[in-house]
Image (cartoon, rainbow, N blue to C red):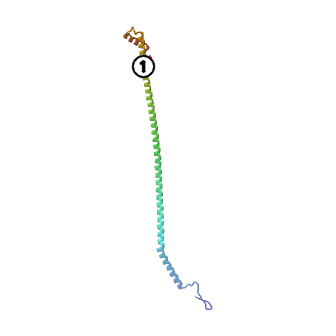
Amino acid sequence: MILLTGGETYDRMFGLDWQLLADSVLTLIAVFILFTLMSYFLFNPARKMLNDRKQKIKGELDEAKANLDQALLMKAEYEEKLQGINQEAESILSEARRRALDNENRIVAQAKEEAARIMERARTEALLEKQKMADDVKKEMITVASLMAGKVVAASIDAKVQDQLIDETLKEMGENTWLS
């Protein structure tokens, strides 16, 4: 308190005395103790929770990176397999084309052989037919010659003379006549 003239007392707004100093020191000690206790019971668990969360996020990021690396590795592996499959498909197609050409050549060769056999058989049949016709013509001529000779010399010629006349007639006509 401050005494003013006229007997009035005036209280200071901020008085520095030993009681204020002691209260201030005790308040500071109480705040320090309170801060220490709060730090131990509140801040440390919060820090621990933040560190745990930080470790969890770091672990998830590491796992994501590992998964990404694994995915890239699998992608490269699949692309390699796909390339191998494309090459295998191309080789299968080229093999199929080669076999198709071989089959085509074999079928064409077989057809040519068959055509040659058919032509040879036709020639053989034509020769046989020609031979048969020639034989038929010979028989017909022999029959005609026999009839003519039989009529001409029927009364006066015997069988021996008749055979001789037929042979002479055939010799005169010749073998080339029968074959053409």
Image quarter hosting the N terminus: bottom right
Q: Is residue 59 above or below residue 156?
A: below
Estimate how packed mark 1 is, as few (under 14), some (14 to 19) or many (20 or more) residues with alpha carbons within 10 Å.
few
> Which residue is found at the position 47% from the left and 76% from the top?
37
State the residue lying farthest toward the bottom.
Answer: 7
Among the 4 quarters of the image, the one containing residue 166: top left
> Which residue is found at the position 43% from the left and 27% from the top?
121
State the residue lying farthest toward the right.
Answer: 6
Q: Is residue 168 above or below residue 13?
A: above
The count of marks equals 1
Depth check: 70 or 127 in front? 127
* Residue 82 x, y percent position in the rendering: 47, 49
Image quarter hosting the C terminus: top left
Q: Which residue is mark 1?
A: 136
Disc 1 element: helix
* Residue 25 x, y percent position in the rendering: 51, 81
Among the 4 quarters of the image, the one containing residue 110: top left
> Which residue is found at the position 46% from the left and 41% from the top?
96
* Residue 13 x, y percent position in the rendering: 58, 84
Depth check: 14 or 156 in front? 156
> Which residue is found at the position 46% from the left and 51% from the top?
78
- Amino acid type at circle 1 is Asp
Depth check: 119 or 108 in front? 119
Q: Is residue 179 above or below residue 43?
A: above
